[in-house]
Image (spheres, grey):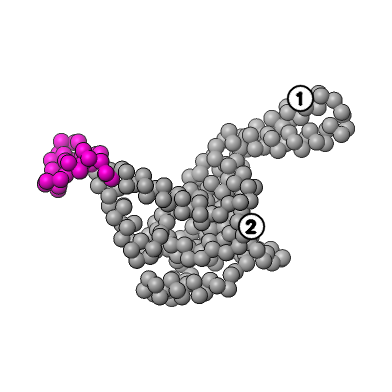
Amino acid sequence: MINPLKELQKEHQKNMDELSEKTVITETNRLLSEKGQEDYEMLKDLGMHHNVKKVMDLKGKKIEIDTLEQKYGRIYTRDEIKAIACRYALKFRRTDEYKGYVDPAIMQKIRELAAETGDQIDASALGRKFYILAPPAAFELKEEIIERPRDPILFYQIGYAGTHYRAVHQWGTDMGWWRQLMGWKYHSEGNYFQYWFALMFLIIFAFSVVLIPSWYVAIHSAVIAFCIAAARLTNEEHPQRDWDVIWENDIKPKP
């Protein structure tokens, strides 16, 4: 079973470890240890400042995250949420688009967030700064009520830049392996082709072997499945060639 919040925590920890490693570059620290800005300007004039600038930017990013976490506790970047949303084919949308089951504890969690952080959470903030990470079905209006949704997570957007978020509340049940498969199939064109080839082969073979009990059925099924998978891969209506396209078209939160 998959718990997206735990996966997000792992992603965040991995990124923070990498950030810490990249900012402890002895060469750069040595270059800037004595006369930081003056040395940097000299390197810039020499055209040799690029690596130093990267490290300085990373240090600034780490300081920003550390500062925000002192006030908000553990926070997540947009890129970290994007990685989990893409990995498991989830959507990250504002709360007004969510159509699934609502946990009554949400209101109390928001009040606790406001008391803990000191942020003013008024009608404007409620309408623009809260987001839900959940499977696509949770954003589709249905007649039946789903009492146990698949792990929706409520996020609070810190500031208005949309770069950092805090997880406020999670409810529902863990997601199964099928959700991971749904994300896996879009990770590359090869994965997408394999998914449809395997699916079509099993369906065609299952029906054909009943009608024509022969080993030729396997070959015929494979050929037909290959053609269908190739057709879907080259279909102009399939825009999800990579995760940046998916994020921009289907997952990225609306302003």
Number of marks in the rendered image: 2
Res 231 visible: no
Q: Is residue 153 magenta?
A: no
Kindly indicate whether the residue at mark 1 contacts the one at mark 2 (C-beta within 8 angstroms). no
Instruction: Tell me which numbered mark, 2 or 1, is placed earlier along the sequence.
Output: 2
**Residue at the location (67% across, 37% down)?**
196
Q: Badge 2 is on which residue? A: 137
> x, y (%) of residue 49?
21, 39
Kindly identify which numbered label has been placed on residue 51. Answer: none
Q: Is residue 46 magenta?
A: yes
**Residue at the location (72% across, 65% down)?**
144
The three-letter amino acid code for the residue at tag 1 is: Ile
Circle 2 SS class: helix
Q: Badge 1 is on which residue? A: 219
Mainly helix, strand or loop, the magenta region? helix
The three-letter amino acid code for the residue at tag 2 is: Ala
Q: Is residue 217 above or below residue 203?
A: above
The boundaries of the magenta stretch are: 23-52
**Quarter holding residue 27:** top left
Q: Give the CA separation, mark 2 to mark 1.
A: 37 Å
